[in-house]
Amino acid sequence: RGQTPATTTDSFIHNRIIDNTMSRGDQRERDRAKKQAKLNQQKAKRDGDPQQRNANDAAKLQAKVAAKKLKEGANAVPVSSGPVPRKRVPKKKEDTMDDMLMAGLSASKKKGGKK
């Protein structure tokens, strides 16, 4: 088409290099914009004076603890001061040497199968 073979080859190589480096398209830029928007949202949540935020957080925590104590007080079960009986655990039968040797064997093992 009016281009020399050297120019066509150079153009082809140049296009391949661009294609390889740009294989993700604008994904990287979209990800950066998305991350920046997320960071801006987080900063918006933390607006105001840090001392005032700390005071508000402390007040919320105290209210939460007080509500929990009220709830526990309403659901309180009286604790008995008497001794707690121990749970009975059955005694294990100690295995003898014969029991250990016979553990994997069945008593009625037959050679061959059912017919």
Image: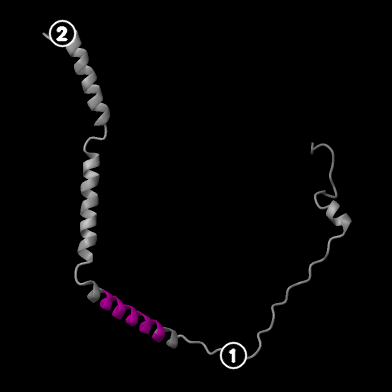
SS label for mark 2: loop
How many marks overall? 2
Quarter of the view holding residue 31: top left
Along the horizontal axis of the image, is 53 left or right of 64?
A: left
The residue under the point 76% across, 72% down is: 90
Numbered range of the magenta stretch: 54-70
Position of residue 76 measured from the top left corner of the image (x, y, whole percent): 48, 87
Position of residue 95 measured from the top left corner of the image (x, y, whole percent): 84, 61
Q: Is residue 65 above or below residue 115?
A: below
Quarter of the view holding residue 2: top left
Position of residue 83 measured from the top left corner of the image (x, y, whole percent): 66, 88
Along the horizontal axis of the image, is 38 left or right of 108?
A: left
Along the horizontal axis of the image, is 115 left or right of 12?
A: right
**Dominant SS in magenta:** helix
Cα separation between marks 2 and 1: 101 Å
Outermost residue, left side: 2
Residue flagged by tag 2: what amino acid is it? Thr
Q: Nearer the viewer, mark 2 or mark 1?
A: 2
Q: Quadrant of the N terminus?
A: top left
Along the horizontal axis of the image, is 67 left or right of 96?
A: left
Kindly identify which residue carries mark 1: 80
Q: Residues within 10 Å of mark 2 (few under 14, many from 20)?
A: few
Residue flagged by tag 1: what amino acid is it? Ser
Kindly identify which residue carries mark 2: 4
SS label for mark 1: loop
Q: Nearer the viewer, residue 51 or 70?
A: 51
Q: Is residue 36 above or below residue 56?
A: above
